[in-house]
Image (spheres, rainbow, N blue to C red):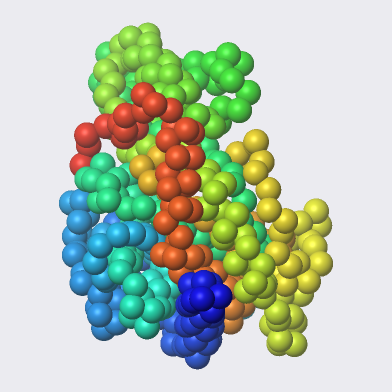
Amino acid sequence: MRYLLLLPLLLSAFLTFAQSDNSATVLKQLDAQTDHYGDIAHQIWELAELGYKEEQSSLLLQAELKQAGFTIEAGVADIPTAFVASYGSGKPVIGLLAEYDALPGVSQAAVPEKKNREGSQAGHACGHHLFGTASAASAIALKEWLMSSGRSGTVRLYGTPAEEGGAGKVYMVRAGLFDDVDAVLNWHPSDKNGADASSTLANKSAKFRFYGIASHAAAAPQFGRSALDGVEAMNHMVNMMREHVPETTRIHYVITSGGEAPNVVPAFAEVFYYVRHPQMREVKNIFNRVVKAAEGAALGTGTTMDFEVIHGSFNLLPNETLTRVVHKHLETVGGVTYTAEEEAFAKKISATLPEAKQTDLSAAQEVQPFSAPEKPYSASTDVGDVSWAVPTTALRTATWVPGTSPHSWQAVAAGGTSIGTKGMMVAAKTMTLTGIEFFQNPELLAKAKAELDRRRGADFKYEALLGDRKPPLDYRD
């Protein structure tokens, strides 16, 4: 009788050992495919396709997932380069995000000195070539684990274009593509390894277009009405407004069109604005004040004005329940260890950084302690909208030389080498181990959902900051 009572405990121990052994096998398979996934990432690095123009990059990832047995739905949410790849059936549904857009104006070769890459004006200065590839690798590894473990559940990878200012994920959330997902795994390239329950800035952008009357600027200025005056008056009023907004607000602009010739009163001018704040509700309020400044500028200069919202994204809603699990598995996987050749490359890159950013290269091997900081990161991401729809977690890994800032030529350079590939595989392994635990632990997912409900409030109803506009597929033109 005593042995019969012990049987359930022994069975549970055996299943735990078997699942752990399967996890180890999956990680070994990922190790064995490092060169393969590194090659895919490098192809996307070479392509360096801008937001909503990532045709070949998207197809590369789709082909890899289709070959692994995933069902592909392409062109979702009215975005030709967006896709959803699915494997399995039933609950839980575990989603992974994959980005693959590059940035304009940061062309760089994979060398430790500033050097434009011939034939390209863009570069992966935020490492999205690594982002998308690692997520695909992890999704495939989780599919293999599901098959070997015999468990039910669904792995779903979301191919999400145009994170850099195009808000691709917002349109996918708005289309309901995340409605049945239990948890989302996400990561980002960085100069360090860590997982913390932190937030970001919400963000809303728009192009303000002023229309005036052209005239000879010397012979008949009295008959003209300068659209550029409208832009400059708006900018002046917004700059005065900075004193009267919350301190954590960020407002940036560039004049994208200011006229064609000094001796012609400009009939058209355009200015492109970003408004950011840690809370999306405040972004709405501040953005509306910017619109009022534009209306006043048009009235005062005798011009007319309209504006087009380009993108908008919520602040990231952290989920400490899930992120503690990510951190645990990141500590298991560990950081990035350089070879002698990689260390020599890293030292040369480090020497080009501002002195305040130069740091010990051993930081790439370390995993930062877990934290839940109150202050958000001074950046924005369309992952924010996903995190308000479904419990979402993230990590960052050292794909760049310690001290490197994102959106820099140094980030492009390291991302095109084995340093980037090593960091990418740390992310793939960590997400795989985390995903396995999500499949095994329904109580964890229930706790994460309860945390999401508490953080967003009982009266929350999702309304995208960008309204009902269609995806701006030409925003990089």
Residue 429 visible in the snapshot: no
Q: In the figure, residue 369 lies in which quadrant?
A: bottom right
Residue 147 visible in the snapshot: yes
> Residue 376: image x %, image y %?
60, 39
Q: In the figure, residue 245 lies in which quadrant?
A: top right
Task: Give above or below for 394 relative to 426.
Answer: above
Q: Residue at x 39, y 19 (%)?
A: 288
Point out the residue furthest to the front here. Answer: 1
> Residue 173: image x %, image y %?
29, 45
Q: Residue at x 79, y 61 (%)?
A: 358
Q: Residue at x 53, y 43 (%)?
A: 318
Between 136 and 432, the one nearer to me in the picture: 432
Task: Give above or below for 135 relative to 300.
Answer: below
Between 96 and 230, the one nearer to me in the picture: 96
Between 68 and 10, the one nearer to me in the picture: 10
Apparent side of residue 471 relative to residue 414 in the rendered image (left or right): left
> Residue 406: image x %, image y %?
58, 57
> Residue 42: image x %, image y %?
45, 79
Between 449 and 316, the one nearer to me in the picture: 449
Point out the residue furthest to the bottom here. Answer: 32
Q: Residue at x 41, y 64 (%)?
A: 439
Apparent side of residue 429 relative to residue 157 in the rendered image (left or right): right
Task: Give above or below for 19 relative to 457.
Answer: below
